[in-house]
């Protein structure tokens, strides 16, 4: 039985569907790249899968149960990082990392958070306000959460944006390890062609017929 199943799902803008209904299933140790032209709804469908907005069509299931009825179980097993990183500009890097995970019900000790920041290339920035970081550093701060969670499902919207070459290489390694350790990955990444060769499957969204 697949862990995640989508049956004929689609999202809507105004009175029109964004893309033709799509279906897929994912089990532990599998990954899905969602592709398609700009504006077709890649971010929207990821947000819907993450439980942040509703679907206009179709059904999402988690462990063969309708996701809309089992959102608590879903949120306890999944982590979403979107275009908007969720960093608070008035908090420093350590405070950002620890407070975000606290909301997820995860207690992170300061040494653990410091180690995660070092691994993402933010050693020495522990007490710097997030609002003063560069775009790439802000993305690294958000992605540091991946090192501190034990969630099996990662939902990542364009995580490679604003990362330099070393940052992209680091992230690819982290994603590889997650899937190899029986994690599930759903991702959009139009600007990183390497990921296309690493995912289990690719789902290409096509415009809905008007």
Image: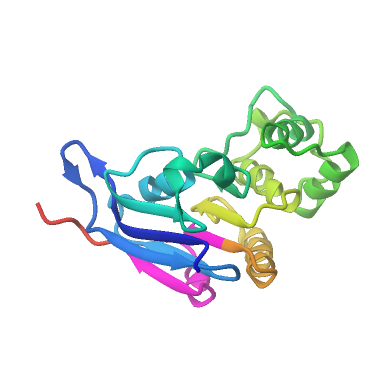
Q: Residue furthest top?
A: 90
The residue drawn where x is 16% and y is 43% is 16
Assess whether residue 188 is covered by the magenta stretch: yes
Nearest to the observer: residue 157 or residue 129? 157
Q: Position of residue 190 (x, y in %)?
A: 42, 61
Specify whether residue 189 is in view. no
Q: Position of residue 132 (x, y in %)?
A: 66, 30
The residue drawn where x is 36% and y is 39% is 54
Assess whether residue 51 is covered by the magenta stretch: no
The residue drawn where x is 45% and y is 41% is 69
Instruction: Tell me the quarter of the picture where residue 13 sits.
Output: top left
Q: Which residues are magenta?
A: 185-204
The residue drawn where x is 55% and y is 50% is 162
Instruction: Tell me the quarter of the picture where residue 8 sits.
Output: bottom left
161 relative to 23, above or below: above
Nearest to the observer: residue 163 or residue 152? 152
Q: Residue furthest bottom?
A: 197
Q: Position of residue 150 (x, y in %)?
A: 72, 52
């Amino acid at each position: 039985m697949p862990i995640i199943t989508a049956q004929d799902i689609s999202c809507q803008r105004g009175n029109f569907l964004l893309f033709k209904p799509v279906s897929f299933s994912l089990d532990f140790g599998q990954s899905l790249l969602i592709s398609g032209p700009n504006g077709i709804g890649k971010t929207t469908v990821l947000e819907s899968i993450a439980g942040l907005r509703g679907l206009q069509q179709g059904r999402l299931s988690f462990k063969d149960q309708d996701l809309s009825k089992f959102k608590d179980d879903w949120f306890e097993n999944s982590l979403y990082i979107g275009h908007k990183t969720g960093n608070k500009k008035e908090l420093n890097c350590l405070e950002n990392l620890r407070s975000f995970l606290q909301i997820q019900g995860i207690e992170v000790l300061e040494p653990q958070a410091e180690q995660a920041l070092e691994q993402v290339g933010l050693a020495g920035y522990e007490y710097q306000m997030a609002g003063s970081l560069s775009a790439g550093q802000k993305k690294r701060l958000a992605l540091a959460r991946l090192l501190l969670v034990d969630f099996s499902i990662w939902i990542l919207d364009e995580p490679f944006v604003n990362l330099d070459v070393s940052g992209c290489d680091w992230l690819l390694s982290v994603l590889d390890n997650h899937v190899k350790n029986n994690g599930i990955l759903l991702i959009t990444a139009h600007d990183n062609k390497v990921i296309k060769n690493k995912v289990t499957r690719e789902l290409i969204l096509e415009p809905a017929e008007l």
